[in-house]
Amino acid sequence: MLLPMRVLTEQECPEWCLANGFDLDQFDHPAVMKTTQAELFRIPEGAGRRIALVSNHLGWFRDADRVLVWIAEWGVWRSSERPHIFDRFRQAYGVHEPLTKKCRHLFTADEFEDTVSFVSLAVLFLWDCYVLTRRRRL
């Protein structure tokens, strides 16, 4: 049985990335732009279109045993974000530390809807985030 969502520490996260097939850049972030599996896209205008974008893209992660949602940057577009909503949402998961200290969330396969919800809030608030799972090797 997999343990429920937990927050990885700053030290655990790079270890998880390396163990799951992701190289790291000079900032210890996943060097996903070097892979063919990374996708860049424009964030659409409108909340409905943003939610649809998340739902469509995260369908690829539905069967993953673990999914890492790493909120990498926030506070750039302050008029578009409501960090209080995210803080209260995370409190329901037992996470009481601020995003500045705990920004790496590891979900189990049974928590797919939770994963979608975390990523949806990040996209709605125009935050940068990585969504990673173990890389499949061919």
Image (cartoon, grey):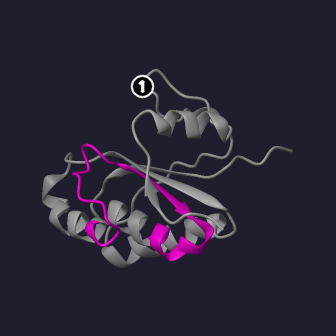
Q: Which residues are magenta?
A: 91-116
Q: Is residue 32 visible?
A: no
Q: Nearer the viewer, residue 70 or 6?
A: 6
Residue at image coords 66%, 42%: 20
Residue flagged by tag 1: what amino acid is it?
Phe
Residue 24 within the segment the image draws in magenta: no
Q: Nearer the viewer, residue 61 or 78?
A: 61
Above or below, 97 against 24 in this view is below
Residue at image coords 69%, 41%: 36
Q: Tell me the quarter of the picture where residue 38 sits.
A: top right
Q: Nearer the viewer, residue 28 or 108?
A: 108
Residue occupied by mark 1: 27
Percent across and percent down for residue 35 are 66, 37
Percent across and percent down for residue 57 are 57, 65
Using residue 122 as the reference point, say whether residue 16 is left or right of it.
right
Quadrant placement of the N terminus? bottom right
Using residue 67 as the reference point, say whether residue 63 is left or right of it.
right
Percent across and percent down for residue 64 are 67, 62
Above or below, 46 against 61 in this view is below
Residue at image coords 30%, 60%: 95
Using residue 119 as the reference point, say whether residue 75 is left or right of it.
left
Using residue 125 as the reference point, say whether residue 39 is left or right of it.
right
